[in-house]
């Protein structure tokens, strides 16, 4: 096997691990933000004084979305290269992965701009500040759409790993389950919304250390 092919496989592996690690840390950060930081700042609340008093806390959540975007992009690039022989599925991975990254960035940028605008309007133009904050439903929807596409990325990559026997049936099946839960996240009842992210952490951590058959084949050819 040529050194170029080996270098490509090594790069794909490193991109996959780096993307998985960044996404894992991003999810952990977001769980910390949702379960600890937001409640400490008085959220959820519709009180403008509370909302604008907790702007710094809210910005943490939006900045984390950029980490989601970068992690998703790296993970997508790595997975596409690892399964490049399965063209239809890698094309799907490219579409959903790049779409998810773009939506994460859009949600983060819009959220930060809305907070800055509302802060500049309050308290002199209270009604305008309140109307600006209400647009946050758009950032929430963009984030939900991004998670939907990340679920699609996990499902498609797990199918690829299953079809070329690079991953065990159990790991691939687990990935498909996690992906489906993320796809359905937008309609999951409130107490259960953390299930998919927690299982996603498990899947990403597992992905970082799994040795697929394609890597074993490279070592044998050498």
Image (cartoon, rainbow, N blue to C red):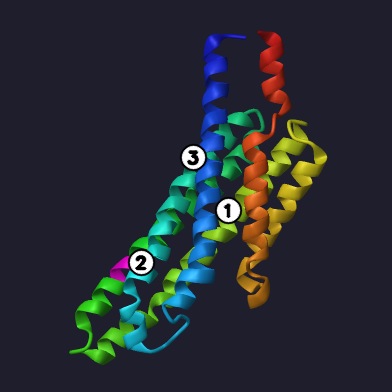
| Residue occupying the point 48% across, 66% down | 33
Foreground disc of the pair 3, 2: 2
Q: Report the span colored magenta.
A: 110-114
**Number of numbered discs present?**
3
Q: Which numbered circle lies on residue 74?
A: 3
Picture quarter with the C terminus: top right
Q: Which residue is mark 1?
A: 150
Mark 3 vs mark 2: which is more N-terminal? 2
Q: Is residue 93 above or below residue 52?
A: above
Residue 71 can be seen in this image: yes
Looking at the rendering, which quadrant does residue 118 occupy?
A: bottom left
Q: Which numbered circle lies on residue 205?
A: none
Give the percent coordinates (x, y) of residue 88: 64, 38
Q: Which residue is mark 2?
A: 59
Q: Is residue 15 above or below residue 21?
A: above
- Along the line of sight, which residue is nearer the eye, 83 or 22? 22
Looking at the rendering, which quadrant does residue 50 occupy?
A: bottom left
Give the percent coordinates (x, y) of residue 100: 50, 54
């Amino acid at each position: 096997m040529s050194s170029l092919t080996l270098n490509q496989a090594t790069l794909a592996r490193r991109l996959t691990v780096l993307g998985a690690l960044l996404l894992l840390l991003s999810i952990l950060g977001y769980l910390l933000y949702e379960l600890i930081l937001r409640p400490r700042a008085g959220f959820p609340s519709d009180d403008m004084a509370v909302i604008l008093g907790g702007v710094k806390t809210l910005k943490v959540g939006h900045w984390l979305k950029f980490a989601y975007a970068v992690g998703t992009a790296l993970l997508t690039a790595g997975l596409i290269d690892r399964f490049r022989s399965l063209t239809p599925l890698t094309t799907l991975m490219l579409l959903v992965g790049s779409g998810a990254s773009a939506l994460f960035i859009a949600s983060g940028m819009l959220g930060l701009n809305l907070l800055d605008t509302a802060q500049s309007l309050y308290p002199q133009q209270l009604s305008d500040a309140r109307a600006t904050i209400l647009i946050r439903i758009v950032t929430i929807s963009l984030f939900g759409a991004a998670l939907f596409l990340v679920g699609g990325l996990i499902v498609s990559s797990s199918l690829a790993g299953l079809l070329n026997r690079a991953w065990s049936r159990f790991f691939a099946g687990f990935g498909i389950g996690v992906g489906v839960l993320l796809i359905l996240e937008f309609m999951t009842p409130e107490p259960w919304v953390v299930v998919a992210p927690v299982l996603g952490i498990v899947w990403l951590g597992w992905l970082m250390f799994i040795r697929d058959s394609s890597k074993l084949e490279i070592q044998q050819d050498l």
